[in-house]
């Protein structure tokens, strides 16, 4: 292999390309990024390779005669455009006056395409302006397998969210959750103050016990038993008082911290429920679960344990310092000598821990994401025999987590013993200086003994306070990740002064000059459509034409970019979301059932529904018969996501769930796509009766299922190109006619194949 390619072996080029790519590279040429394309110009699957080096662009394309390599020497002013549409990604290379090349790929290669475009742009910038180019890309993200910078822990694609610098001051934002419990917190603080003061009494009593009892006894005097009893009683009383106050403060502050944690979890989850679908589209389930679960638990532990310890440490250090100064200023100065060095060390280490613990939180989410992906999808994993692949995925994420933790542990393991060493040195200084003062009769042995007792407490608390740095930074990282959720504003906001829908709702829908974009990609363009009350509309078009997007806009899962959607003459953006959606019944192509009983799932949109209403909805959806065949009927439990039921059964329960709320607007998104022909006929019979009097919008790829629609609306690339009934559109021989004819030919081909198979079976 070429030496330059070997130097970049960490890019892990697919093995099938290594030999061929090596032959194309010159000895001085360095690979910056690569992309394995998998579509040709006709959008047929065909493997190719695109490489950006510090000198050229290399492209390998399969041909009848074998692999064909092309190359372009990088020039100033060249541009590489990247965009995607309908599941196909495109990279386009152009100069100032002409198009040079185009590569297409499926979107599972999109992250590599983004990184290749970055490397290309950086190199062209260097060629044009002479600016430095960083190409130290060796490590790989365990999540998306993209190359990472040297010593980098975060993937620029997986972590696209713009993160504000982490600061310990972010913990003060928790005050909004602590404010309702401020009086309990004040009581806890006063108890902490009192218990700390009680723990400082025993060392003070050892001073007269040594000077007035033990040392005189060694000099031949009799022991004053009353005085001994007084001092020992004081020590016992101080210990008992410290214990009782310590228990009270710990219990009160633990109760408060648990309530703060519970409020934080509830608030974060409620806010999450109010965010639009757009937010969830860019987030991993495991990461959100980790934030609301593990992060809030970490904050709760910090508030209930570590923050209390920190407050106790501060009070103990201040009160001990005051007592030491009151006893002997010279010894107190010697005792406090290591303190400035420890404070400086904490300041230095804090920044490293601050960023490190946030990275740990993120890589830990990678582990949670793997679990959140594979456990619900275990049937697919096993069906495709991918257990080893998923185990390797988890192992890679675990290794990444281990590597990040190792770096943080190196810093922390060095910091803690250093603080301990400084406190030990400080103790030796006090011993030496104290012995010198005793030998010169400037202090008594009792004073030195009391000093040593206090200094033991002082340095123990100082060491404990330094250790709290790690817990503080962990809690700050967790708080930041939770407030990233709480600070996110929904892209589908509630109306400031919502309008009330008329009662009863007619169900007229007016779509006026509507446009919508996913990022920079226009999905709906200038769409106008009027749907009359009680009318059934069939949305027709190829995949990616904008049918489901239009339905999402009508439900206001997303907000339109331009134009207006009105229901009974009222802009839906001026209606309260809960009020508006309570009039919509939605049946999705992939039905989702919650873990629980059949009855609970049907009544999900109307929890207070009677059993009679639930049964009536199930009958209308042709689900009653199969429900009664289950062991506990309507009280039968379905597994997570309804795994205990067939696809057709899940769909019929989903339809019953939509029908129970008696919606004025009914939306069917491929409602019969996942059922067999016999079940489809049963559901279709029910739907033929149920759509009467309701404004219905139905999406279906099988055009035969829309024969009852009053009007068919044909979409192409987000634009309305045709509308009318079946006969009218067939007579036009336009977009609808082409779709219908293509489906008819496919159906005929399937029947022919089925007939051939049947004849072969008859012969056998």
Image (cartoon, grey):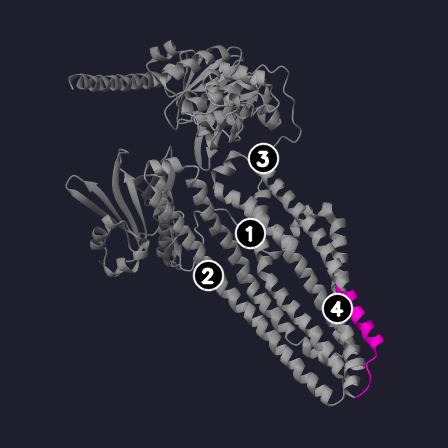
Per the model, the C-alpha gap separating discs 4 and 2 is 39 Å
Asked if 635 appears above or below 71 in the picture, the reply is above
Query: Residue placed at 38% from the left, 39% from the top?
Result: 83
Q: Which residue is mark 1?
A: 164
First in sequence, mark 1 or 2: give its number: 1
Q: Residues within 10 Å of mark 2 (few under 14, many from 20)?
A: few
Q: Which of the two discs, 2 and 3, sits closer to the camera?
A: 2
First in sequence, mark 3 or 1: give its number: 1
- The reply to whether callout 2 and callout 3 are in contact (CB within 8 Å) is no
Q: Is residue 142 visible?
A: no
Q: Nearer the viewer, residue 142 or 733?
A: 142
Q: Which residue is mark 3?
A: 274
Q: Which of the two discs, 3 and 1, sits closer to the camera?
A: 3
First in sequence, mark 2 or 3: give its number: 3
Where does residue 685 sit, x and y in percent of width and height? 44, 11
Q: Nearer the viewer, residue 606 or 48?
A: 606
Query: Residue placed at 60% from the left, 27% from the top?
Result: 578
Q: Which residue is mark 2?
A: 406
Q: Which of the two discs, 1 and 2, sits closer to the camera?
A: 2
- In the displayed structure, does residue 353 sit left or right of residue 61? right
Where does residue 471 sit, x and y in percent of width and height? 59, 58
Dominant secondary structure of the magenta stretch? helix
Magenta range is: 220-239
- The reply to whether callout 3 and callout 1 are in contact (CB within 8 Å) is no
Per the model, the C-alpha gap separating discs 2 and 3 is 38 Å
Per the model, the C-alpha gap separating discs 3 and 1 is 23 Å
Query: Residue placed at 70% from the left, 52% from the top?
Result: 251
Q: Residues within 10 Å of mark 3 (few under 14, many from 20)?
A: some
Q: Quadrant of the N terminus?
A: bottom left
Q: Is residue 237 magenta?
A: yes
Q: Which residue is mark 4?
A: 200
Q: Quadrant of the C terminus?
A: top left
């Amino acid at each position: 292999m070429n030496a330059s390619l070997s130097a970049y072996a960490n890019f892990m080029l697919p093995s099938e390309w290594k030999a061929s790519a090596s032959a194309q590279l010159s000895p001085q040429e360095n690979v910056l990024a690569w992309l394995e394309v998998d579509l040709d110009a006709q959008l047929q699957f065909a493997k190719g390779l695109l490489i950006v080096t510090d000198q050229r662009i290399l492209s390998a394309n399969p041909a009848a005669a074998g692999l064909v390599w092309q190359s372009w020497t990088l020039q100033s002013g060249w541009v590489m455009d990247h965009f995607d549409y309908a599941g196909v990604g495109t990279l386009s290379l152009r100069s100032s006056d002409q198009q040079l090349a185009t590569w297409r790929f499926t979107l599972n290669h999109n992250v590599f395409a983004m990184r290749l475009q970055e490397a290309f742009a950086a190199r062209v910038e260097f060629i044009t302006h002479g600016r430095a180019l960083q190409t130290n890309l060796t490590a790989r993200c365990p999540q998306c397998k993209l190359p990472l910078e040297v010593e980098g822990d975060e993937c620029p694609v997986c972590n696209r969210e713009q993160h504000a610098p982490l600061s310990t001051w972010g913990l003060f934002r928790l005050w909004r959750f602590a404010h309702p419990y401020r009086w309990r917190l004040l009581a806890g603080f006063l108890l902490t103050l009192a218990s700390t003061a009680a723990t400082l009494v025993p060392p003070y009593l050892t001073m007269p016990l040594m000077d007035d009892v033990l040392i005189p006894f060694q000099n031949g005097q009799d022991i004053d038993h009353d005085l001994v009893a007084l001092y020992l009683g004081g020590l016992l009383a101080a210990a008992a008082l410290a214990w009782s106050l310590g228990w009270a403060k710990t219990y009160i502050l633990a109760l408060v911290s648990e309530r703060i944690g519970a409020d934080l979890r509830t608030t974060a989850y409620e806010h999450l429920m109010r965010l639009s679908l757009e937010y969830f589209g860019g987030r991993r389930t495991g990461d959100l679960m980790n934030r609301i679960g593990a992060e809030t638990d970490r904050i709760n532990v910090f508030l209930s344990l570590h923050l209390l310890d920190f407050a106790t440490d501060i009070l103990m250090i201040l009160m001990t310092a005051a007592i030491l100064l009151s006893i002997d200023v010279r010894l107190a100065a010697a005792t406090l000598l290591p303190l400035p060095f420890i404070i400086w060390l904490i300041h230095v280490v804090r920044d490293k821990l601050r960023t490190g613990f946030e990275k740990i939180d993120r890589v830990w989410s990678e582990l949670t994401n793997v679990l959140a992906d594979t456990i619900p999808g275990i049937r697919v994993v096993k069906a495709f025999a991918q257990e080893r692949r998923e185990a390797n995925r988890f192992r890679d994420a675990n290794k990444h987590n281990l590597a990040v933790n190792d770096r943080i542990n190196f810093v922390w393991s060095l910091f803690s013993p250093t603080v301990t060493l400084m406190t030990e040195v400080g103790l030796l200084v006090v011993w030496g200086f104290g012995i010198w003062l005793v030998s010169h009769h400037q202090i008594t042995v009792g004073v030195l003994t009391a000093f040593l007792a206090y200094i033991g407490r002082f340095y123990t608390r100082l060491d404990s306070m330094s250790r709290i740095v790690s817990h503080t930074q962990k809690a700050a990282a967790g708080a930041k990740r939770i407030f990233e959720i709480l600070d996110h504003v929904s892209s589908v906001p509630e109306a400031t002064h919502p309008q009330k829908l008329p009662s009863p709702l007619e169900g007229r829908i007016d779509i006026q000059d509507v446009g919508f974009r996913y990022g920079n990609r226009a999905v709906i363009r200038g769409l106008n459509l009027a749907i009359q009350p009680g009318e059934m509309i069939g949305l027709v078009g190829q995949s990616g034409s904008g049918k489901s997007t239009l339905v999402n806009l009508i439900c206001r899962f997303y907000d339109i970019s331009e134009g207006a959607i009105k229901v009974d003459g009222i802009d839906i953006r001026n209606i309260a979301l809960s009020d508006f959606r309570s009039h919509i019944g939605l049946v999705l192509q992939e039905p989702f059932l919650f873990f629980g009983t059949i009855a609970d799932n049907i009544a999900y949109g109307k929890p207070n529904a009677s059993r009679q209403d639930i049964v009536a909805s199930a009958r209308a959806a042709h689900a009653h018969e199969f429900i009664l065949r289950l062991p506990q009927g309507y009280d039968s439990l379905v597994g997570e996501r309804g795994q205990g039921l067939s696809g057709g059964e899940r769909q019929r329960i989903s339809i019953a769930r939509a029908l129970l709320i008696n919606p004025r607007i009914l939306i069917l998104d491929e409602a019969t796509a996942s059922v067999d022909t016999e079940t489809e006929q049963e559901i279709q019979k029910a739907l033929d009766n149920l759509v009467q009097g309701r404004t219905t919008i139905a999406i279906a790829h099988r055009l035969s299922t829309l024969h009852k629609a009053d009007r068919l609306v044909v979409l192409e690339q987000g634009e309305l190109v045709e509308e009318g009934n079946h006969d009218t559109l067939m007579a036009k021989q336009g977009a609808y006619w082409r779709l219908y004819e293509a489906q008819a030919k496919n159906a005929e081909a399937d029947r022919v194949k089925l007939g051939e198979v049947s004849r072969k079976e008859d012969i056998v």
